[in-house]
């Protein structure tokens, strides 16, 4: 079964993660962007600590 494509690009996801890293409460960030906390933590596990350029490289490798 194929997964539904994300509504957010990698750049947007990293931006959302940065908001929380900057000190905003996780629940507030999730509510603002309309994502569940489970989705947020899944993103954090995958993209946490990545720069936008790193995310693009990761995506290119996954597509190969």
Image (cartoon, grey):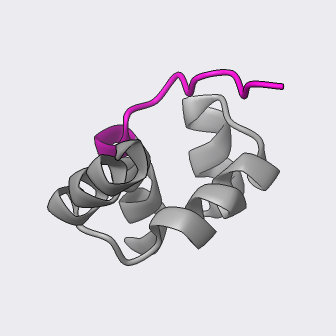
Specify the principal SS of the magenta part. Answer: loop
- Percent x, y for residue 2? 74, 25
Pick the front one: 23 or 63: 63
- Percent x, y for residue 37? 77, 52
Specify the quadrant of the image occupied by residue 34. top right
Pick the front one: 53 or 33: 53
In the drawing, does residue 17 fall left or right of residue 6?
A: left
The furthest residue to the bottom: 49
Specify the quadrant of the image occupied by residue 3. top right
The furthest residue to the front: 64
Specify the quadrant of the image occupied by residue 35. top right
- Percent x, y for residue 17? 45, 59
Pick the front one: 45 or 16: 45
Residue drawn at x 29%, y 44% is: 11
Q: Using the rendered image of the protein, determine whether residue 23 is visible from the camera's viewpoint.
A: no
* Start-end of magenta stretch: 1-12
Whether 59 is drawn above or below 50: the answer is above
Q: Is residue 56 highlighted in magenta?
A: no
From the image, which quarter does the N terminus lie in?
top right
């Amino acid at each position: 079964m194929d997964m539904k494509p994300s509504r957010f690009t990698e750049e947007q996801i990293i931006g959302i993660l940065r908001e929380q890293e900057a000190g905003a409460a996780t629940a507030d960030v999730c509510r603002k962007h309309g994502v569940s906390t489970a989705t947020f933590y899944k993103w954090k596990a995958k993209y946490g600590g990545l720069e936008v350029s790193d995310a693009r490289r990761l995506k290119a490798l996954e597509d190969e």
